[in-house]
Image: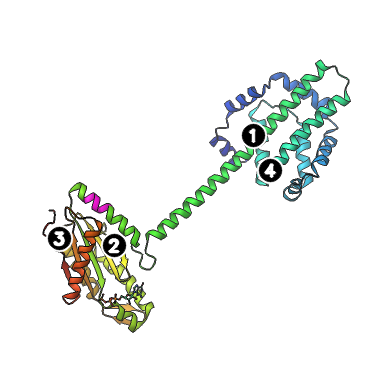
Amino acid sequence: MNAEIVTNCVVLGFDCKRIQKTISLLGLEAEHGQHAERLRSEFIEGKAEALVSSCLDALAPYEDFLLIKENIGVESFKERWIDYLCGFGQNFDTPKYFEDRLGIAVAWAHKRVPLGVLHLQHCLIQQALVDSLLIQCKLNPKTVWPLVDCIFKITSLSMYLTVEGYHLVEVDELQKTLDRLNKEASQLHQKVATDQLTGVLSYSTLMDTLERQVNKAKQNGSSLCVVMADLDFFKKVNDTYGHLVGDIVLKLTARRIQAAIRSFDMIGRFGGEEFVIILENTDLALAKIIAERIRLGIAGTPFHAKKFEIDITISLGMAMLKKDDHLETLLERADAAMYKAKKNGRNRVAVADNLEATS
Ligand SMILES: Nc1nc2c(ncn2[C@@H]2O[C@H](COP(=O)(O)OP(=O)(O)OP(=O)(O)O)[C@@H](O)[C@H]2O)c(=O)[nH]1
């Protein structure tokens, strides 16, 4: 058994205690070891290949047998079963026996040998051993029965371990699938959470974040400001330099805003050329300083996009959370302030009417 399989056994709690329980459930006892030894020496030795061949002949017409041919090869499958018969029930009460049978089952599961075929094969082997026993010896029922009983018990144990081995592989594969899906989900989440062009929060994440911040500020009685920032005459940038240059300007705008705010402030894309900045634990006076810093960050230096040098300005509207505010009213007031800034000549910061602001 390789290390991975041993680890899987441990993960599933396939320990000695469980082995002992299975053995006792099947009614396997020390005397079955002796019966198995007798079966091997008197009824299997020298006949293992013929017994296995007869079983495989019976299996051959079965549709799924084709998969054995394709996935593992009939010869190698046959060899496994000859080995199994030659060691029939030998050391069945040791962990190593369990590990070996499990290891073989795991290997078969990886090779996509159908479990149904293995089940049938176990039944056929069982049948072949019983037939051979009854045909070949003239033992009285008292002597035959313990041997038949031993055949049933050992093959049942073997089938049980085969199913366990398949179970290990299935659990392992399910875990891998789960890991892959989790990874995909987090990548998808990351994609949805971020605006693909500018790298700032997407609209939906921005709204979720703002909603959480509003609730938190109301609960704690802390101050919260929102800044709505909208580039001035951005249509003209697109019209003059083209849409691709417009995209570059948007990316650079996001970067400049990020450089102007504090590390814990949040910025998201609200619409085309419109951004929202969330300022937690911030009153209007401080928010105004930050908004001014943003304005200067944009207007202070021309934008370099492709071969062009473009002067850009931005208008900003600010609002502070009021007692009876909710997400929408807070944004509406910041938006109204931003339009006021536009109306008053652009490239400026305007404050929403905040007479009822909480302090
Ligand atoms: N390049 C680019 N342009 C965009 C994007 N999203 C929106 N726009 C453009 O942004 C422009 C917004 O124009 P308007 O709403 O008229 O605003 P404006 O020209 O900035 O004028 P004011 O806001 O009044 O100063 C439109 O031309 C949109 O096509 C985008 O992702 N990339």
Q: Position of residue 115 (x, y in %)?
A: 68, 41
Q: Where is mark 3, residue-wise?
A: 284
Which marked residue is nearer to the observer: mark 4 or mark 1? Answer: 4
Tell me which numbered mark, 1 or 2, is placed earlier along the sequence: 1
Disc 4 on helix, strand or loop? helix
Res. 1 in view: no
Q: Where is mark 4, residue-wise?
A: 108
Q: Where is mark 1, residue-wise?
A: 99
Tell me which numbered mark, 4 or 2, is placed earlier along the sequence: 4
Viewer-nearest residue: 87 or 169:
169
Label 3: how many Cα within 10 Å (few below 14, some 14–19, many 20+): many
Q: Residue at x 59, y 43 (%)?
A: 170
Specify start and end residues of the magenta stretch as a single range.
212-217
In the picture, which quadrant includes the N terminus?
A: top right
Tell me which numbered mark, 4 or 3, is placed earlier along the sequence: 4
Tell me which numbered mark, 3 or 2, is placed earlier along the sequence: 2
Which marked residue is nearer to the observer: mark 4 or mark 3? Answer: 3
Identity, as a three-letter code, of the amino acid under mark 2:
Ile
Q: Is residue 327 left or right of residue 141?
A: left
Q: Which mark, residue 267?
A: 2
Q: Is residue 307 above or below residue 8?
A: below
Res. 352 in view: yes
Q: Position of residue 7 (x, y in %)?
A: 56, 38
Q: How is the image coloured?
A: rainbow
